Amino acid sequence: MTSTGTALKLKRKRLEEIIKSCSRFALAFSGGVDSSYLLSEAIRVLGPENVLAVTASSVLHPETETEGAALIAGQLGAEQLVLPLDLLKVAEVANNDADRCYYCKKEIFIALIEEVGRHNFSQVVEGTNADDVSGHRPGLLALKELGVRSPLQEAGLGKAEIRQLAKEAGLPIWNKPAAPCLATRFPVGTKITVQALKSVAAAEAMLRDLQVEGDLRVRIHGDLLRIESEPASLEKLLELRGIITSRLKNLDFKYVTLDLEGYRMGSMEKLSDKKD
């Protein structure tokens, strides 16, 4: 076994120990790679009766993601609870403040902790990984304040390692692209509305229907829509530009653009930094 393989094996063993130390917990479950792998390991280590998967449902998350989470939970044999939330009632979230994630996470996890308490679960965990601690991450402070644990991060597991372990575990979504909340599609300080979120979700769903694969974001700047994709998808997007432009303008976007720099994580935050 290579040194890399040995290190990964040790991290997985550490994750197992962390899960055992929690004994019984509710997991904030999005259906993404991180939370799905954590759920599968928790069920393996603790048994399905000691794990509750809780999925927050709101306009900040596409319905397809909520549906996908239910499918994965069912495949893993986990009990799942869907928790509907009105996150736009929080002013800092609706106004897309720089620290939006702090207030959003706080709202989600306070509601989650209260709800799972009624199901006799006192410990709450979530799927932040070791790569997620870099950059501007105000949501992590909210988790710390509420006593929410992040086993993947505690075990030192990064995204690529989790994908590898998820593949080895036979999880069908091991290579699923990340799907952060839809508020990340708007510049910091831009007020977010239900209709704007629905338009973004519809735009990205349309591009997926056209078989645009990999990391993909639709970014909104007023009446201009900017598509970020992986470089491998640029040619396909250009070939379909007539169809794409027509369909996106039907969603009331005046201008449709393709970003030649491609997908960049946190590009809206970086744009805000340049203005400061």
Image (cartoon, rainbow, N blue to C red):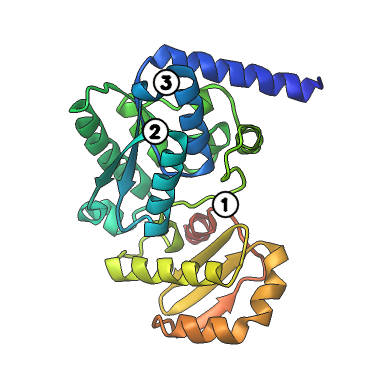
Name which residue type carries label 1.
Answer: Pro
Q: Mark 1 points at which residue?
A: 177
Q: Mark 3: give few (<14), some (14-19) or many (20+) Cα within 10 Å.
A: some
**Which SS class for mark 1?**
loop
Residue 153 to residue 104: above or below: above
Say which label, 2 or 3, has the lower sequence index. Answer: 3
Say which label, 2 or 1, has the lower sequence index. Answer: 2
Asked whether residue 99 is in view, the answer is no
Query: Residue 4 appears at what percent x and percent y?
Result: 76, 25
Place residue 26 in its image quadrant.
top left
Name which residue type carries label 2.
Answer: Ala
Residue in the picture at 30% in, 28% down: 146
Residue 241 to residue 265: above or below: below
Q: Nearer the viewer, mark 2 or mark 1?
A: 2
**Which SS class for mark 3?**
loop
Q: Name the residue under label 3.
A: 47
Residue in the picture at 18% in, 28% down: 118
Q: Mark 2 points at which residue?
A: 78
Name which residue type carries label 3.
Answer: Gly
Query: Residue 199 appears at what percent x and percent y?
Result: 38, 72
Residue in the picture at 31% in, 65% down: 191
